[in-house]
Image (tube, helix red, strand yellow):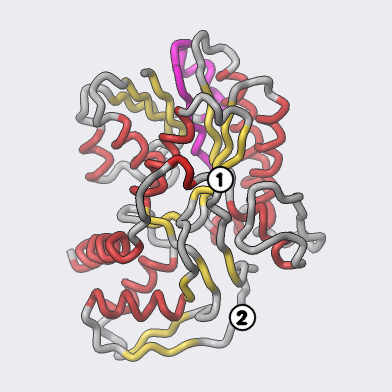
Amino acid sequence: MNYLITGGAGFIGFNLASVLSDDTRNKIVIFDNLSKQSLDDDFKKILKRKNIKFIKGDLKNISKTIKSKNFDYIYHLAAILGVQKVIQKPYSTLIENIISTKEVIEYAKKQKSLKKICFTSTSEVYAKTLELGLTKYPTPEKVDFLIKGDFNERSSYALSKIVGEYLFNYSGLKFVIFRPHNIFGARMGFAHVIPQLVKKFLDKKKNFISVDNPNHKRTFCYIDYAIELIIKISHNKNTSRQIYNIGAPRKVIAISELAKQIKNILKSNKKITFTKVINKDHSPKKRKPDMNKSKFFLNRTHNLKQGLFSTVKWYENYYLN
């Protein structure tokens, strides 16, 4: 099979490319502008595989940059994301995410044997509907979109993904849309709660750590489980024009409990203190996907404990070295 992965140097894209390239019959093209400076040792290592080709470029020029018309699957994962980046640059987030998605769709239409194009949306599309209590919890895929009327900057990301979902629905292509929920693992970046907590515990200047939004609840999904779901769903012939939550089909965990588990893994003696909930970044108080539709494709249990241990140890090694 021939695969194209946009944003393939990023967290999910890197892991997807790694798993797909384990089968030497597959040929993978990674397209990324390296805006996140993702050319690290792990990425350089998989680029040594003979069945992976890396192309650095701008998605606005994808049709001119990649001439091939023989891709079987396209995974469009590239996007401006990250809460702080989105808040700082809402206009760029909205415009660039929409334009890049449009260009990838136009490129996909030129493919001769395309079986499916896959788009990563976001769990953020549920935020306002959940806040107003207008949908069930856990949240199923079939939910009406609502956008806050206060024009807060964070909404620009969710809106760009909502427009992306509409573009795919009108494209005439065979597609599948994924809505990831709190995917975590090694090399996920540093602007996330798990690596931030690890860093706080390793800081020798303080004998305590402060945890923000301790009562917020999430279902954290380990990257290996998420990638296996994405691959199996995208390759199933009956999933065309469908939307799937990607997350952990387990009970939620509060940020306060997450901090305690990380403390135990690191064997830290630091005291944990909890701040008052300020929630400046408009983070949802709770988030849990309804996984009844998605978990049908994966007959194994999600192991949060094992995934968290592996991730914390990776970041511990990174920070200490």
Check disc 2 and report its element: helix, strand or loop. Answer: loop
Residue 62 placed where, x, y %? Answer: 52, 22
Q: Which kind of residue does numbered mark 1 sit on?
A: Lys
Q: Earlier in the sequence, mark 2 or mark 1?
A: 2
Residue drawn at point x = 43 percent, y = 90 percent: 273
Q: Is residue 71 magenta?
A: yes
Q: Which residues are magenta?
A: 59-79
Residue drawn at point x = 33 percent, y = 76 percent: 261
Residue 210 placed where, x, y %? Answer: 43, 84
- Along the viewing direction, whichever of 48 and 272 lies nearer the viewer: 272
Q: Which kind of residue does numbered mark 2 sit on?
A: Ile
Please give the residue where the numbered disc 2 appears in the rendered image.
278
Residue 128 placed where, x, y %? Answer: 72, 61
Whether residue 90 appears in this view of the structure is no
Snapshot quadrant of residue 127: bottom right
Whether residue 170 appears in this view of the structure is yes
The disc label shown at residue 293, or none: 1
